[in-house]
Image: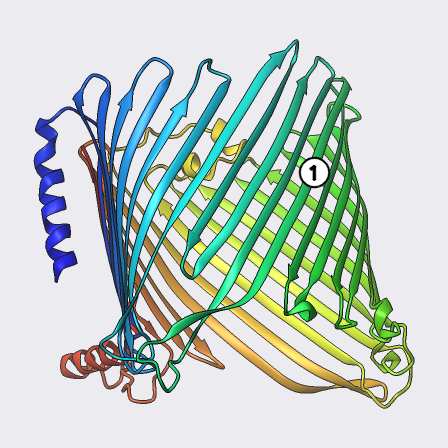
Amino acid sequence: MKKRILFFFLSLFLLCSPYWKAQTQGLDWTVYSSQQVLSIENALQYRFYPTAKTSLVINSKSNIENRLNFNQEAKNADLNVGLELMSKHFMHTISSDYQTFYDNSDLEPAAYVNKTAILGYHINYSPVDSLNIGIFSKGILRNEQDRYVNGYSLSSEGYWFGSNASYSNYILNSIAGISANAERKRMDWESFDYANLGANYNYYGNYLNFACLANYNYHSEDIYVLAAPEQNEIRSNYQLSDNQLRWNFDISGNLQYSPEDRVQLEIRDNYSLRQTSYSKSKIRNNTDHYNQAQLHLDYQISQKVSWQSDLAHTYAIKDYYYDLNTRQTDNRHIGSRINWEYSEGDSLIAAYFVNLQIIKFPEDDNQWDNDLLTHNLRFGWKHYWHERVVLGNWFGYSFSKDVYIDSLLSANNKEISSWTMFPECKFLIGDRIAFFQTYQIRADYSDYIYNTGKNNTLYRQLGYQYNLVFDTFPLIARTLDPRWLELPFRNSPENAFMIDLGFAYEENQYAQQKQSYYELQTKNRRWTASIDFRHDIKNLYWTLSPQYTWGTWKELTFNLNSACLFNNNSLIEFKLAPFIDNFENIDSVSFHNFSANKFFKMVKQCSEAADWRLSTTLRLYF
């Protein structure tokens, strides 16, 4: 109740504040509700200038969440008030922060309450634009509910201080910078040390661009565990359980070389080393090595022919010191793509990619080692017929070989051949109506390399989707098709609406090989009908998107979204999304037995069976 009263007064303060001179004022309020959870979130930000070099900053946020599936209520709130004093090179900030957290559920014997108060001071020094130095210190008081003993609380106090510095400089056609920051926090049962050092360099030339970034991060944290009170104690106590040390080192570089306008070469490399160690739980110590190198070539052979080629290598090691399950992953990729635009907008595309993934477990006698080699070949065609009809088709073939090195797992070695085809056709009628057709045909054959009694398998997929769209925007302008934009079309009205009628079908079949034929094991079918309606009225828009799926399973979704912009980008937004996947207790209505009573009865049953998802957002800026 106190948090709600506080939020009310802060909201009232914000609404009355437009009459004061302020730089930023904002209020966000969101409500989300469903059968599983109810959530209310709000955030407030305000900056007020009492004098020319003084500013008062208020930031507040809170969240209330009720999980209905296991009866849990969680609340948290944060109120921060800061006073900034500015001079020529210095900025002083005095801030206070109050945080509360409440958690109550059937899984815990009593509610958990945590309250934290922070008072701090921060000074920032900027003698020049490229140099910035800051130092802060904070005092912390915390009071939390004892989880094991009802009615008692645990108190803690401590400090938190740190510093940061950054410097950058322009040298000829390049810019270089360095930054560093360090922090230390000490409380009765919370302690950590943090340090970060970063450097960057960028060079911009006529034909050559280069960028490099390096970063080192250090984090040491004490881990405390709350222990139940012993026989002679009336309160619980925190005990030091372990110390976790994490440090990361990352470096990345990017080189772009363009000797002429038609040729561009790019080289990238990213390397990172991460290590985590524990003082006591040494079995959890681990190290991550990661390196990725890439080479990309873009060559415009002629005005109508372009060629792109890629070469990449990724090497990663996940190393556990004591568990003997270190994993090494080696990924290699090479690919090439050529595009021939034989006439304006009409093009032929051919692409070929090879990927090799090698996984090794050297400390486990390599018994889980695996190699996966994949070849991908794709052909694409796009053609404009009489300007208003677009024909296209993608044809693909891929071949992969999945091999386990160890003989105990070699029974899983197999080859997979996949054939795919994706035809599509678009009809444009006038400037506001279009009919879209897309199809998909796919067949995957899995053949085991060794005769171990496992049957080869077949997977087939067939699908298509039709969309009839009417758009007064008009549709030509919304599609952004380069050829269609050259056609004459009307200007967009302030009151525009769009309706999209869709119908889709998909069938999946799974079969096993029996001698010289495949025997069908399972299949599923799905039909989907949908309507997507959108209406824009100046700064107001709303959408309605019902969708019904039937076949092997049934689903019904109904999405209603609306938003209104006003007062300098402020908005109010509403979303409603009921979902139904259980139709056992819903009576169907057909044309033969249709009546108003039966129809409204079915609507009521659908409303009771639906999982309602409701969201409302209010965002105000002054």
The residue under label 1 is which amino acid type?
Ile
Q: Is residue 379 above or below residue 559?
A: above
In the image, 255: left or right of 546? right
Q: Is residue 330 above or below residue 240?
A: above
- In the rendering, at what x and y percent does residue 365 appear? 88, 74
Residue at 78% x, 73% y is: 445
* Res 515 quadrant in image: bottom right
Considering the numbered disc 1 on the image, is that residue within a helix, a strand or a loop? strand
- In the rendering, at what x and y percent does residue 219 appear? 57, 50
Quarter of the image where the C terminus is located = top left
Please, which residue is most extreme toward the front here?
232
Residue at 63% x, 54% y is: 423
In the image, 410: left or right of 579? right
Residue at 75% x, 45% y is: 292
* Res 503 quadrant in image: bottom left
Q: How is the image coloured?
A: rainbow
- In the rendering, at what x and y percent does residue 547 appear? 37, 66
Q: Can residue 588 be seen by looking at this rendering?
A: yes
Q: Can residue 572 be seen by looking at this rendering?
A: no
Please, which residue is most extreme toward the top here?
172
Q: Which of 503 and 546 is in front in this view?
A: 546
Total numbered labels placed on residues in the image: 1
Q: Is residue 508 above or below residue 188?
A: below
Residue at 42% x, 78% y is: 554
* Res 232 quadrant in image: bottom left
Which residue is labeled 1 in the image?
Answer: 251
Q: Which of 299 and 203 is in front in this view?
A: 203
In the image, 488: left or right of 455? left
- In the rendering, at what x and y percent does residue 495 appear? 23, 38
| Mark 1 crowdedness (10 Å alpha carbons): few <14, some 14-19, many ≥20 | some
